[in-house]
Image: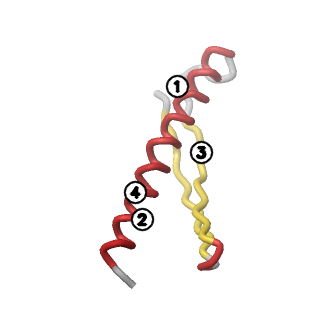
Amino acid sequence: MNDEALNMSIRKFLKTVGVNSQLAIEKAVRKAIEDGTLKGTESLPATMTLQVGKLALDVKFDGDLKLG
């Protein structure tokens, strides 16, 4: 195994996940505020799941998204 190649591919994957998930969340929050579903001051519980099938890896991360 090439540790450096693995490290770089993990970082690239996480950067892609981070950027795209942030954009998706921001878009959903803006739409919910426009639709009146959210006021824009809430705290939203969020969950992210990381799965790598061949490794039988299934890890859940929990957090809060604070809008105000």
Badge 3 is on which residue? 45
Q: CA distance from mark 4 to mark 3?
A: 26 Å
Question: What's the CA distance linking mark 1 and mark 4?
Answer: 33 Å
Amino acid of disc 1? Thr
**Res 41 label:** 1
**Badge 3, how many Cα within 10 Å: few under 14, some, many 20+?**
few
Q: Which residue is mark 4?
A: 12
Do labels 2 and 1 touch, CB within 8 Å? Answer: no
Q: Which mark is residue 20?
A: none
Question: What amino acid type is highlighted by mark number 3?
Answer: Pro
Residue drawn at point x = 34 percent, y = 65 percent: 8
Which-is-in-front pick, marks 3 and 2?
2
Specify how the rendered protein is coloured: secondary structure
Distance in Å between CA atoms under marks 2 and 4: 5 Å
Q: Is disc 4 surrounded by few (<14), some (14 to 19) or many (20+) residues within 10 Å? A: few
Residue 19: which quarter of the image?
A: top left
Q: Which residue is mark 2?
A: 10
* Element carrying mark 3: strand
Q: Residue furthest left?
A: 4
Q: Horizontally, is 26 left or right of 53 in the view? A: left
Alpha carbons under labels 3 and 2: distance apart = 26 Å
Closer to the eye: label 2 or 1: 2
